[in-house]
Image (cartoon, rainbow, N blue to C red):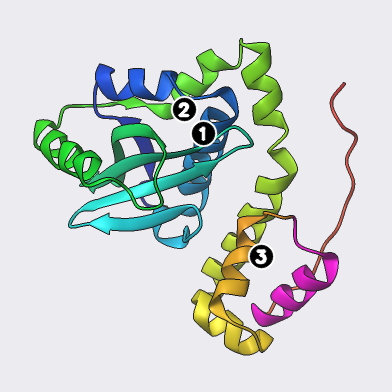
Amino acid sequence: MGTKWSVEFLNDTAEAEFDQLPTGIKAKIVRISQLIEQVGLLSVKEPYVRHVHDKIWEIRASAKEKLARSLYTTIKGKRVVILRTFVKKTRKTPKREIELALQRMKEFIMGKRLQDKHKKLLSDPEYRKAYMELEDEFIIVKALIQARTNANLTQKQIAERMGTTQSVVARIESGKPLPSLKSVIRYAAAVNSRIDLKLVQANK
């Protein structure tokens, strides 16, 4: 197998900005970063990531408290480098935030992996609770995106097979709200797969 994707912070400043986020949003960003590492960045689409400007993209996270964005770029070695994280207060990503990310993009050093930060955060009961609340959502999301990747299909192609629109497929893959079993079965058929459902005992 080839090199897997990794998600990391540019430097201590970028890490500190992440630390200032509400707990629920931190957990969501970590879940999205794990998705990137598990299925590959190129397989993860909106609503989780979106192109912003030039070589700048954003990880898009929301929780009941607020919206946040982590602006990132990619470099050789399948590295996603988070340049700037902030709470989003306007509909569009502010130009000043993009300019700051572009400026920081010139300062590359070996970053700090976000998963190392996640391991430390798990000792915080509030963070651990918020992270675990996202478990079911991202189990489904990972399975759907992995199936699409294995089938070598785009969201648009799946939509055509399902007789719907790309935005509907993107919403199904987002896990928000959790898709119905009927929708998952239709999606599975579109990617030449079938449902293999099993229930496992929850950890106490």
Q: Verify CB contact (< 8 Å) between mark 2 and mark 1.
A: yes
Disc 3/disc 2 C-alpha distance (Å): 26 Å
Residue 193: name its quadrant: bottom right
Q: Verify CB contact (< 8 Å) between mark 1 and mark 3.
A: no
Task: Name the foreground residue: 13 vs 5.
Answer: 13
Q: Which residue shows up at 11% across the image and 31% down it?
A: 107
Badge 2 crowding class, 10 Å Cα cut-off, few under 14, some 14 to 19, many 20 or more, is some
Q: In the drawing, what numbered circle is on residue 91?
A: none
Task: Name the foreground residue: 168 vs 138.
Answer: 168
Q: Amino acid at mark 1?
A: Val
Residue at which label 2 appears: 115
Q: Quadrant of the C terminus?
A: top right
Return the disc, 1 or 3, that comes first in the chain's sequence: 1
Image position of 173 with respect to 70: above or below: below
Residue 75: name its quadrant: top left
Q: In the drawing, what numbered circle is on residue 172?
A: 3
Point out residue 69 in the picture as x, y percentages from the top left corner: 40, 41
State which mark lies toward you, 3 or 2.
3
Q: Which residue shows up at 87% across the image and 32% down it?
A: 202
Q: Which residues are magenta?
A: 178-191
Q: Which residue shows up at 56% across the image and 75% down it?
A: 151
State which mark lies toward you, 2 or 1.
1
Residue at which label 1 appears: 30
